[in-house]
Amino acid sequence: MLDYDPFSDAVMRDPWPAYARLRREAPVFYLEKYDTWFLSRFEDIWWSTTRDVFTAERGVTPEMVLLKAEPPPDPVFSMLDLPRQRDYRRMLAPPYSRGAVGRREESTRARVRRLLRPLAERGHFDVYRELATPLAVEEIAELIGLPAEEAPEMRAQVARFFAREPGQVGTTPENEEERVRLLTRVAEIVAERAGSGDLSGDDHISVMLRTPAEGEPLSIGAVVAAVFTMLVTGSEVLPLSLANTVYYLWRHPDQRRALVDRSEDVRHAYAESLRYDQPTNLLGRFVKEPVEIRGEKLQPGQGVMFLWASGNRDESEFERADVFDISRRPRRTLSFGHGAHKCIGEHLSWLQGRVLLEEILTLAPEYEVDRPGARRAYSEFLHGYVGMPIEFEPL
């Protein structure tokens, strides 16, 4: 009997064996305790994300789909179906276009070098905590329009909200307290901006407050919900992605040496890390209309979870899928999702990841990972390394 539960201790610590078995034995797997289906193969996830038989409007996170937590009362662009979602994406997407992100490279590289300068003199630092997280926080706070001096604590509140302990299923009152504190402060900032009379800026808060969606001005609550979503995705995923990449390159020194000689392949190394160990482990929908997948009949009202990380390790899509190989050039991946809800920050992530890797490899091409200090997140939702200390010859 196949024993899979996303909240189980074994899966929270190491999901890969369970994912491999799901793909082999039950690619469309039903768990009665959650009344939810789990899709583990690439093609099924790819197909499902573009079909109107599923809805995001009842929730997308494991907490909402599996534990039936109530979705936020105000509309969040990441939880709206087409065509409702279009107005929100149009107002938020411009800074994340390929051209707009390309114009950020100089400032992003300057930030990375500023952050690296004192770390380089020490000869050791934590890639996740001391380099990637500060960069991600600075850049997403600037894009959103949050006070720079408050952004690090907001990022810490996000981390405390997602923190999990062995045996924990879903959020605790302590987790929820952190979320409420963060939302309360963000609501104060948004209300202050709305009352200031100056909404001429191009930051997200100003744009949302002056731009109608679905024919109506956005409420304070809707803006706050959007800010929370962007703060989570903009500050958490990049540090996980970079820490993972640094670790896997260390584990494969021949591939790392090849990168030092061919810096133009850095982007491909980052892409392979995102495929091999995707930080966004799973997201879901609810079934809106009856649909059949691989002979299984999914009924309206049931949940469906897309196991993104499993799909990116699917042997039927990727040759030697369980091998980390920076020479891989896949024609498609699930690393940033697919369909109408594909991540709008994809190009920014590519830029940040590439620049960070280039600067690390320039500074310390032979870095060593302090293996005992390399620590993975314990979580059902976002996973990857949250501690990645490296050592090298100081400047």
Image (tube, rainbow, N blue to C red):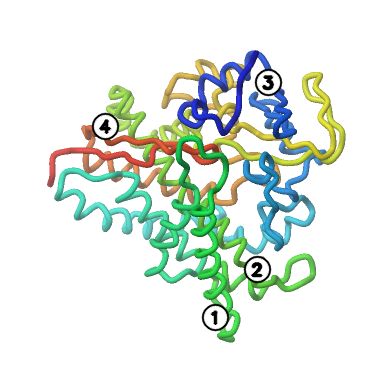
Q: Earlier in the sequence, mark 4 or mark 2?
A: 2
Residue 365, compared with residue 326, is above or below; it is: below
Front-lying residue, 14 or 392: 14
* Residue that mark 2 sits on: 221
Q: What residue type is labelled 2?
A: Gly
Front-lying residue, 16 or 8: 8
Residue 141, compared with residue 171, is above or below; it is: below
Q: Which of marks 3 and 2 is nearer the N terminus?
A: 3
Spatial distance from mark 1 to mark 3, Cα to Cα? 49 Å
Secondary structure at numbered mark 3: loop
Spatial distance from mark 3 to mark 2, Cα to Cα? 38 Å
Nearest to the eye among marks 4 and 1: give it.
4
How packed mark 4 is, by other alpha carbons closer than 10 Å (few <14, some 14-19, many 20 or more), is: few
Q: In percent of the image, x 55 and y 71: which residue is there? A: 202
Spatial distance from mark 1 to mark 2, Cα to Cα? 13 Å
How packed mark 2 is, by other alpha carbons closer than 10 Å (few <14, some 14-19, many 20 or more), is: some
Q: Which amino acid does label 4 sit on?
A: Pro
Secondary structure at numbered mark 1: helix
Whether residues under marks 3 and 2 lie with C-beta atoms below 8 angstroms apart, the answer is no
Please indicate whether residue 58 sits to the left or right of residue 366 in the image.
right
* Residue that mark 4 sits on: 372
Q: Which amino acid does label 1 sit on?
A: Glu
Q: Which of marks 1 and 3 is nearer the N terminus?
A: 3
Q: Earlier in the sequence, mark 1 or mark 2?
A: 1
* Residue that mark 1 sits on: 192
* Residue that mark 3 sits on: 27
